[in-house]
Image: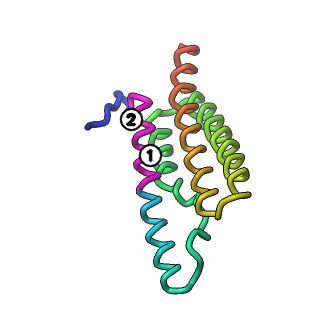
């Protein structure tokens, strides 16, 4: 399945954006689980003690490329700031709630997933709404 891109190089549908972000989260999870396993097997740490927020590295890269693809203008700065703020706030909230019952790998990972989804939704729909409103 191919990704649809608009004239500016941005992903054209919310499904493509979320799919790409989830692919990045899955790749990050795979790498982090291998790292955790090696650390646990060598006795350098317990499994699950790494920070799950590391999963967000590839989605952040995607978001930076989407930001750059939007081109110059105040729309991308305003929506990017709002998306990042809402994404971090909801992600930290979820991670804080899950931290009471789960190790850092799980709580950080749940925060990373939540923050990624919120960022994608606010960025995609917020940018299109603002561009439409301002002409």
Question: Quarter of the image holding residue 101?
Answer: bottom right
Residue occupied by mark 2? 16
Taken as a whole, is the magenta stretch helix, strand or loop?
helix
Left of 77 or right of it: where is 11? left
Q: Residue at x 57, y 14 (%)?
A: 133
| Location of residue 57 in the rendering, given as x and y in whole percent from the top left corner | 51, 56
Left of 50 or right of it: where is 64? left
Q: Residue at x 59, y 80 (%)?
A: 45
Q: CA distance from mark 1 to mark 2?
A: 10 Å
Residue occupied by mark 1? 22
Q: Secondary structure at mark 2?
A: helix
Tag on residue 2?
none
99 or 50, nearer to the observer: 99
Q: Quadrant of the N terminus?
A: top left
Residue 11 sits inside the magenta stretch: yes
The image's colouring method is rainbow
Question: Quarter of the image holding residue 79?
Answer: top right
Magenta residues span 9-26
Q: Residues within 10 Å of mark 2 (few under 14, many from 20)?
A: some
Q: Residue at x 43, y 51 (%)?
A: 24
**Which of pointers 1 and 2 indicates the residue nearer the eye?**
1
């Amino acid at each position: 399945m191919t990704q649809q891109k608009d004239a500016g190089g941005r992903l054209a549908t919310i499904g493509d954006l979320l799919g790409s972000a989830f692919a990045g989260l899955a790749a990050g999870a795979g790498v982090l689980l291998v790292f955790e396993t090696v650390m646990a097997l060598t006795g350098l740490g317990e499994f699950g003690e790494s920070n799950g927020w590391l999963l967000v590295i590839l989605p952040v890269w995607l978001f930076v490329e989407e930001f750059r693809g939007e081109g110059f203008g105040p729309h991308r700065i305003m929506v990017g700031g709002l998306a990042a703020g809402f994404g971090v706030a909801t992600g930290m909230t979820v991670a804080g709630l899950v931290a009471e019952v789960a190790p850092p790998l799980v709580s950080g990972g749940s925060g990373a997933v939540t923050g990624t989804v919120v960022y994608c939704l606010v960025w995609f729909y917020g940018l299109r709404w603002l561009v439409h409103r301002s002409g």
